[in-house]
Image: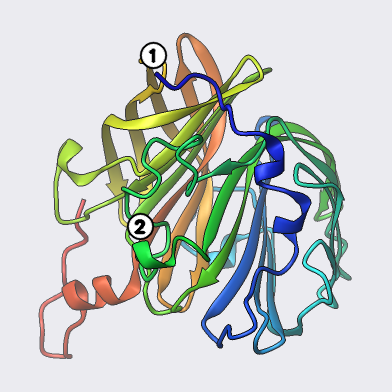
């Protein structure tokens, strides 16, 4: 039986936070990083996203700050985005004209993130991994490695040798300033880092779920989702882990997941998941704050910082409910003389 994460940290090394693109990489090769930064007590959620296409020499940056529950980006506290920035010389040392700096200080676990905008919004945090990165392609991390569908729809099994995806839960400390108010940050959040070929029009319907319980427990789950199914039949668990007592335990496919929806928003989430020790974990999420995020040309993703409960403990964590826009178009697209489509639950 697999126990705690046995893989040595050097398997995901500092070099994995430099460009991984091979010499023959084309315009579809992407290297991306995503950081969540939250203050759950004050209902503040910031998302920092970097997407680079090295063969084209271009970088896409996004920074958004959310403070309410909404289906419109117009209600965000702050949003800044540019798809057409020059790619940095090094992935581990990003200094963008968007005002965003991401510096790997003790890779592969620790980063400094600094952001300044002329509207007064600023983010200054240290992002420090709780444990080694969780490699979804490594069977010593995920029991589903090489078996479950990849995070990105166009990555088949034949790409596993060159593609990569890792997730990591970390302690984030510092400040976020927005609308003249400065909020302290001292919370557990998640980051991810991916590389490989990625067609921007191929996006999977999925839930990407994090739940943290102070001071030392953190969950992360990648859950393929079928909007046409109901109840537990709508979900699978592809990859996931629980950080418990300073150790990381992979989650198996033994999971029961249900959710409630209002439009594009997740209004409730119930999860029963099992780790490699055979330990079952029952978690429940209820709405907090959230807003849409455009994660790609063919993605509509509602990101919500939700309230979680687990074994009598109250926690927090981000739920990303991802829709394929093409899938929605097939179901909801209509001519002017057609009837209005119903929003499915």
Q: In the image shown, does 168 or 8 lie closer to the viewer?
A: 8
Q: Which residue is drawn at 32% across and 59% down?
A: 205
Quarter where residue 246 is shown: top right
Q: Which residue is drawn at 48% across and 9% down?
A: 312
Q: Using the image, determine if residue 236 lies above or below residue 202.
A: above
> Looking at the picture, how far across and down is residue 264, in whole percent?
35, 57
Residue that label 2 marks? 264
Residue that label 1 marks? 279
Residue 43 visible here: no
Dot 2, crowdedness within 10 Å: few (<14), some or many (≥20)? many
Quarter where residue 96 is shown: bottom right
Q: In the image shown, does 188 or 14 lie closer to the viewer?
A: 14
* Sequence-first disc among 1 and 2: 2
Q: Is residue 302 left or right of residue 258?
A: right
Which SS class for mark 2? loop
Q: Where does the N terminus fall, quadrant-wise?
A: top left
> Looking at the picture, how far across and down is residue 86, in whole percent?
78, 85
Q: Using the image, determine if residue 42 lies above or below residue 299.
A: above
Q: Residue at x 42, y 57 (%)?
A: 151
Which SS class for mark 1? loop
Q: Using the image, determine if residue 221 lies above or below residue 59.
A: above
Q: In this view, does 206 lie to the left or right of 175?
A: left
In space, the residues marked 1 and 2 are separated at their CA atoms by 32 Å
> Looking at the picture, how far across and down is residue 255, in whole percent?
28, 30
Q: In the image shown, does 290 or 60 lie closer to the viewer?
A: 60
Q: Which residue lies furthest to the left in this view?
A: 338
């Amino acid at each position: 039986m697999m126990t705690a994460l046995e893989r040595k940290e050097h398997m995901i090394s500092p070099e994995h936070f430099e460009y991984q693109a091979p010499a023959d990489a084309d315009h579809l090769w992407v290297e991306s990083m995503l950081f969540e930064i939250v203050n759950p007590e004050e209902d503040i959620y910031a998302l920092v996203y970097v997407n680079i296409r090295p063969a084209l020499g271009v970088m896409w940056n996004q920074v958004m700050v959310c403070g309410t529950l909404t289906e419109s980006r117009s209600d965000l506290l702050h949003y800044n985005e540019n798809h057409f920035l020059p790619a940095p010389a090094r992935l581990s040392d990003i200094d963008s004209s968007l005002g965003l700096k991401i510096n790997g200080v003790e890779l592969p676990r620790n980063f400094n993130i600094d952001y300044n905008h002329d509207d007064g919004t600023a983010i200054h945090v240290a992002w420090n991994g709780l444990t080694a990165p969780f490699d979804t392609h490594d069977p010593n991390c995920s029991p589903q490695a090489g078996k479950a569908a990849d995070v990105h729809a166009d990555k088949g099994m034949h790409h596993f040798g060159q593609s990569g995806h890792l997730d990591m839960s970390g302690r984030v400390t510092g400040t976020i300033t927005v609308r003249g108010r400065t909020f302290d940050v001292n919370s557990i959040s998640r980051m991810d880092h991916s590389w490989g070929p990625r067609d921007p029009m191929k996006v999977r319907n999925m839930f990407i779920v994090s739940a943290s319980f102070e001071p030392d427990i953190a969950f992360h789950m990648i859950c393929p989702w079928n909007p046409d199914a109901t109840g537990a039949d709508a979900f699978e668990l592809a990859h996931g882990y629980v950080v418990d007592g300073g150790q990381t335990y992979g989650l198996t496919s033994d999971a029961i997941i249900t959710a409630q929806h209002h439009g594009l928003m997740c209004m409730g989430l119930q999860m029963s998941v099992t780790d490699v020790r055979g330990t079952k974990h029952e978690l429940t999420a209820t709405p907090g704050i959230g807003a849409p995020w455009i994660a790609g040309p063919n993605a509509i993703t509602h990101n919500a910082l939700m309230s979680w409960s687990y074994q009598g403990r109250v926690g927090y964590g981000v739920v990303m409910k991802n829709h394929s826009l093409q899938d929605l178009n097939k179901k909801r697209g209509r001519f002017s003389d057609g009837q209005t489509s119903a929003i499915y639950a």
